[in-house]
Image (cartoon, rainbow, N blue to C red):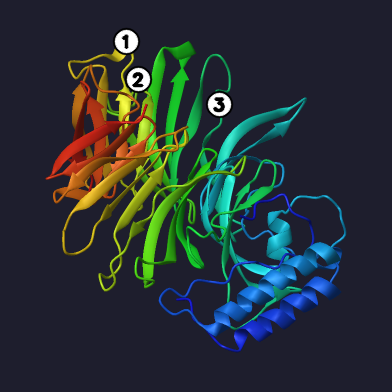
């Protein structure tokens, strides 16, 4: 609440006057702090919100080569792994993108491949940057991951939304090789109770997913559609 | 309107905090003091030509973050601080700024204007891309000189400092916390939805499309659910009588 005190303007006047006239800028600069950063100085910032940051770490050899994505919460020295920054080689590797941040949560979509692309996996996860805990993790849809490292997931994520409680929804675009009767695009949700597909078809706008409170929206065949996300 | 670049150096804040419905002499005194100190700062500071930066503000005031993204930080400066210590008393003024982090450019979000009235403050801000959208509550003079509480959502291009003004809407007294929901996209489209006075029970969805200065009302009526507003590049969504509606912002 903003309160008024009659005497305060006098204090305001004296204090600001003193600072303005007497204190040189250089002296004041000495007390400046950076309370809104937690990443190492050499790391490349990927995304940030009011409470946390995610950033790329890597090596500097003739330029910056990202190796991993890490995250931290302001005021904390703890850093946690969020995802892989890029493929290791032509034969295999993983690449993650931070799709959304809400508070101290980061939602990440990861695509990986092996055997020169013969095996592909697409996954989504939600990481709590305060503790590093993996709150949600799943393939982007069927087929689910198998022990023999066959392809997993319905395809790469084209858009994703994140709720403050860690629930997520996304649209997966299925590659031609993995097409099923569900169609080219599917809308999924992942809540504490599990994963479900809420829409599928060939006419879903892959970039149309939006979130308002407990409702997700998307556009299919030019018309808006919605589903609860609770 | 005060927009950076300004002189570097200690920065007295030039706007007293809002006391909606309680204008008083204390606030006027603080305003006069701050204005005088602003002029003094310009005279007293060395003419370095440097831009006002977040550091200059937060060196001498307590700063609190309101919203942030990779490239933007919106923060509020209030109490006077020196050598790591801040005044204990409640601040007499609060000023909100948006900093474009790649260049350090800082712009005051809601400089006092006649349109906004003597007292105005930013209560909420959202950022995307190079844009910030923020909710302003202000006290203006009504039709019969009575104080009238107004609210609005404005957009600012934080990289350039370019501001888009929008129409204000009146707030009825005694209605409790106002339900206002808004969002901004990385391309600069802003949408907001709010419930009108308690008498009518009607709600409105307004959209300010990117690169436009004209606000459009895209939905209005008793069945519009303000809390259901969602905005992404290309689409604004909301629920009307439980059914999804959309407006193309392209």
Q: Residue furthest left?
A: B241
Name the mark on residue A151: 2
Q: Which residue is mark 3?
A: A86
- Comparing B64 with A15, the one in front is A15
Q: Are marks 3 and 2 on the same chain?
A: yes
Q: Alpha carbon of mark 3 to alpha carbon of mark 2: how far?
A: 18 Å
| Residue plotted at (87% across, 59% down) | B46
- Chain letter of mark 2 equals A
* 1 and 2 marks in contact (CB < 8 Å): yes
* 3 and 2 marks in contact (CB < 8 Å): no
Mark 2 or mark 3, which is nearer the start of the sequence?
A: 3
| Above or below: residue B104 compared with residue B145 | above
| Residue plotted at (55% across, 26% down) | A86
Query: Residue B206, how many percent across, how many down?
Result: 31, 44
| Above or below: residue A229 compared with residue A88 | below
Q: Which residue is mark 1?
A: A177
Mark 3 or mark 1, which is nearer the start of the sequence?
A: 3
Q: Quadrant of residue A189?
A: top left
| Residue plotted at (83% across, 64% down) | B43
Q: Alpha carbon of mark 1 to alpha carbon of mark 2: how far?
A: 10 Å
Q: Quadrant of residue A125?
A: top left
Query: Residue A181, how many percent across, how many down?
Result: 17, 15
- Chain letter of mark 1 equals A
Residue A169 in view:
no
């Amino acid at each position: 609440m903003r309160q008024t005190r009659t005497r305060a303007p006098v204090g305001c006047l004296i204090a600001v006057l003193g600072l303005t006239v007497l204190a040189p800028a250089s002296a004041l600069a000495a007390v400046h702090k950076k309370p809104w950063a937690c990443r190492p100085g050499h790391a490349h910032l990927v995304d940030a919100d009011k409470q946390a940051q995610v950033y790329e770490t890597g090596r500097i050899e003739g330029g910056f080569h990202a190796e991993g994505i890490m995250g931290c919460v302001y005021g904390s020295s703890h850093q946690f792994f969020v995802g892989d920054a890029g493929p290791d080689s032509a034969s295999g590797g993983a690449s993650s993108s931070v799709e959304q941040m809400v508070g101290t949560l980061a939602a990440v979509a990861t695509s990986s491949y092996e055997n020169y692309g013969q095996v592909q996996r697409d996954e989504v996860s939600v990481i709590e940057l305060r503790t590093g805990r993996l709150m949600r993790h799943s393939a982007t849809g069927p087929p689910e991951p198998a022990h023999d490292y066959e392809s997993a997931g319905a395809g790469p994520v084209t858009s994703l939304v994140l709720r403050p409680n860690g629930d997520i929804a996304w649209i997966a675009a299925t590659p031609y090789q993995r097409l099923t009767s569900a169609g080219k695009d599917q809308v999924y949700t992942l809540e504490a109770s599990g994963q479900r597909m809420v829409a599928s078809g060939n006419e879903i706008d892959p970039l149309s997913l939006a979130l308002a409170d407990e409702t997700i929206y998307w556009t299919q065949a030019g018309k808006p559609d919605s589903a609860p996300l609770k | 309107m005060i927009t950076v670049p300004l002189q570097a150096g200690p920065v007295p804040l030039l706007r007293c905090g809002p006391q909606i419905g309680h204008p008083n002499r204390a606030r006027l005194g603080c305003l006069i003091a701050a204005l005088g100190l602003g002029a003094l700062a310009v005279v007293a500071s060395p003419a370095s030509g440097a831009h006002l930066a977040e550091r200059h503000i937060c060196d001498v005031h307590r700063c609190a973050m309101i919203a942030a993204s990779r490239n933007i930080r919106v923060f509020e400066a209030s109490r006077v601080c020196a050598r790591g210590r801040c005044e204990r008393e409640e601040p007499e003024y609060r000023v909100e700024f948006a900093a474009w982090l790649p260049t350090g450019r800082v712009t005051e979000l809601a400089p006092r204007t006649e349109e906004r009235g003597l007292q105005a403050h930013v209560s909420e801000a959202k950022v995307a891309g190079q844009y910030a959208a923020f909710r302003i509550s202000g006290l203006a003079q009504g039709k019969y000189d009575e104080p009238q509480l107004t609210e609005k959502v404005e957009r600012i291009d934080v990289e350039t400092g370019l501001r888009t003004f929008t129409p204000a809407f009146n707030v009825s007294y005694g209605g409790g916390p106002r339900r206002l929901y808004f969002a901004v996209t990385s391309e600069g489209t802003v949408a907001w939805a709010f419930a009108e006075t308690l008498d009518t029970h009607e709600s409105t969805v307004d959209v300010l499309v990117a690169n436009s200065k004209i606000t459009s009302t895209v939905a209005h009526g008793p069945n519009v659910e303000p809390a259901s507003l969602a905005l992404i590049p290309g689409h604004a969504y909301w629920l009307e009588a439980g059914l999804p509606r959309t407006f193309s912002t392209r």
